[in-house]
Amino acid sequence: MAVPIPIAAATPLLLASTSRYRAELLARLRIPFAAESPRVEETALDGELPAALAQRLALAKAVAVAQRNPGRWVLGSDQVAACNEQTLGKPGSRAAAIAQLRLQSGNAVQFHTAITLVAGDGTIHNAMDTTTARFRRLSAGEIERYVDAEPAYDCAGSFKCEGLGIALCESIETRDPTALVGLPLIAVRDLLAAAGYAVP
């Protein structure tokens, strides 16, 4: 069994991400950390399933940063949305966001959020959270008004449940409400604890 490492004595954690959403979430655990860009190619492989893509990218991000920072604890994460077996990443533009929301209209959408922790001794710990959001049937006008009011071009599926996006849903089924925002803090805490990091 791992001996808990007091936060004050622990090597500062590195978040392998430049996402402000993930940084804001991780800060809620009150653990000192710094963020570093993983600089990882995020293109899906041919035939790669959404959950597998999220897991592969979370691992790749964490390992890339860990290799540049030996001995540091590194947390990587990735989120991929899936609707009708179609992978939905970050739209990047208004037109792509509208197309994604049209696809999601009236459907259940799975948001796969994977996390990987590379501990200071190099051991790797993984977890996955899947949240299902059921979208209302959305009119073209509703979609365009939403995109104009909250252009979530940097969010998987063009959807921010913590903002106006909640008005697009009939229901959200989740184990951890922070997962949909981008970092499942319940799973993060469990991984850190299993690796010997005391939280709180």
Image (spheres, rainbow, N blue to C red):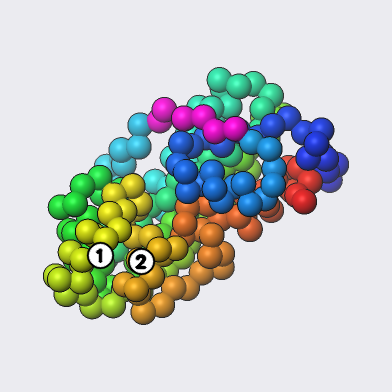
Give residue 35's position: percent from left, percent from top: 54, 33
Q: Are marks 1 and 2 in contact (CB under 8 Å)?
A: yes
Q: Which amino acid, by three-letter code, is at mark 2?
A: Leu
**What is the spatial separation of the Cα atoms under label 1 and label 2, in whole angstroms?**
7 Å
In the drawing, what numbered circle is on residue 146?
A: 1
Q: Please tell me which residue is depicted at 76% across the width and 42% down the height of the picture.
A: 197
In the drawing, what numbered circle is on residue 187?
A: none
**One can see residue 150 in this view:** yes
Residue 139 lies in magenta, yes or no? no
List the residue tagged with mark 2. Answer: 164
Residue 63 in the image: above or below residue 166: above
Give residue 7's position: percent from left, percent from top: 78, 40
Q: Please tell me which residue is depicted at 54% across the width and 48% down the height of the picture.
A: 24
Residue 38 lies in magenta, yes or no? yes
Give residue 101's position: percent from left, percent from top: 23, 63
Element marked by disc 1: helix
| Range covered by the magenta-colored residues | 34-40
